[in-house]
Amino acid sequence: MKVLTYKHGGETAVGVLKNDGSEVVPVNYLGCTALDMNGFLELQDAQKLEKLDKNKELMKGIPLEEVQILSPIPHPKQDVVCLGINYYAHAEEAARFHDEAFGGERPVPIYFAKRVNRALADGEPIDGHLDIVDSLDYEVELAVIIGKDAKDVKPEEVFDYVFGYTILNDMSARNLQTAHKQWYFGKSLDDFTPIGPWIVTKDEFTNPPALPIRSYVNGELRQDSNTGLMINGIEKVICQLSQGMTLQAGTIIAMGTPAGVGMGFQPPKFLKKGDVVKCEIEGIGTMTNEVK
C-alpha cells in the first residue's frame, strides 16, 4: 500500500493510493482521524492497516492529477538518522575523493544526523546554496520509516517495527562536509532532503528488501546498485540503535548510498544550477528535483 501526504483545496491531508494509482483516498474517509503522517503512524497497527488496504478500493477517492503530492513526512519529528559509507564500492570512491574524511577501517556502522526543517517533495526545486557550496552532490538512498516506538529490539523482531520504505536524496555540500570534523552542516542545509514520493508499506516486499536503486543526472545514469548490497543491513542498524535510544514512530533512517555520486568520478561531476536529479528504487517509485 502506498501512503502519501498531499494538498487538495488548500488543505493538507494523508491518503492512500488505490491499487491502480488513479485516485487518492483520504484516510479520514476510512475512519482515521490523523491530521498528518506522524499522527497517522502513531495510530496504526497491522490490523488497522489491513482494514485500510481493503476498504480503500471500495471508496470514491480524489483523482491523483487533482492533488499536489507533498513529501510523505514534510516535517520529521526529529533529525533523520543516516548511515555513512554503507556500500563497499561507495567506500572506495569516497576515500579516493578525500581519504582523511572518508578513508580508514570501519569496524562499526557510521551514524550521523541530518537536520530537516522541511523535506522537499518530488518535483520541487532544490536550493543548491551555490553561493557557499562549490561541490554540490546527490545520494539516492533507501529510507526506512519506523512505525511504532522501538526500544531494545531483538533481531527477529526488527520488521515488526518497520512501517515501510521511501526514497531519500541525501544532498551534500562536499566542501562543507569535509571542512568540518562532523558532517552535520554539509548535509543539513535547507532543501537538502528530498523525500518521496510516498511510503510503501513493508508488506509489499520481502524483508529486508533487495531492490534495484539508481540515480540519474540530466538523464545520465550515475548510480546503479541494489539495496541488498549494504554493508550494514536494516536488522543490524535498528537492533543496534534501539539498544541505547528510543526510535519513535515516524523516525526516518537513511540507509546509505551506493557508488556513482558526483565526488566518485575523476574529475568529479558535481551539480550545477539547472541540473535535474532523478532518484528511483524499483517497487517504490521515482523522485525528480531540479537544482535552482
Image (spheres, helix red, strand yellow):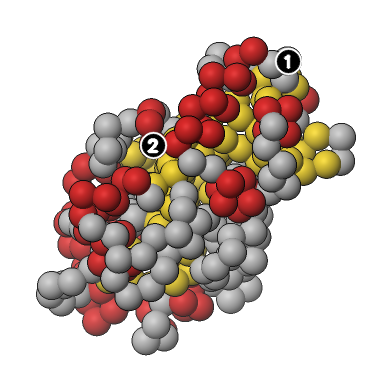
Q: Position of residue 54 (x, y in %)?
A: 54, 19
User: Mark 2 or mark 1, which has the lower sequence index?
Assistant: 1
Disc 2 residue crowd, few under 14, some 14–19, many 20+, Cα 10 Å: some
Q: Nearer the viewer, residue 162 or 184?
A: 162
Whether residue 272 is visible, yes or no, is: no
Disc on res. 60? 1
Q: Nearer the viewer, residue 88 or 153?
A: 153
Mark 2 → mark 1, Cα distance in angstroms: 25 Å
Q: Amino acid at mark 2?
A: Lys
* Residue 161 shown left or right of residue 47 in the figure: left
* Residue 77 shown left or right of residue 158 in the figure: right
Please report the residue visible at 57 percent of the width from the left and 51 percent of the height from the top: 42
Kind of element beneath mark 2: helix
Whether residue 198 is visible, yes or no, is: yes
Q: Amino acid at mark 1?
A: Lys
Residue highlighted by disc 2: 202
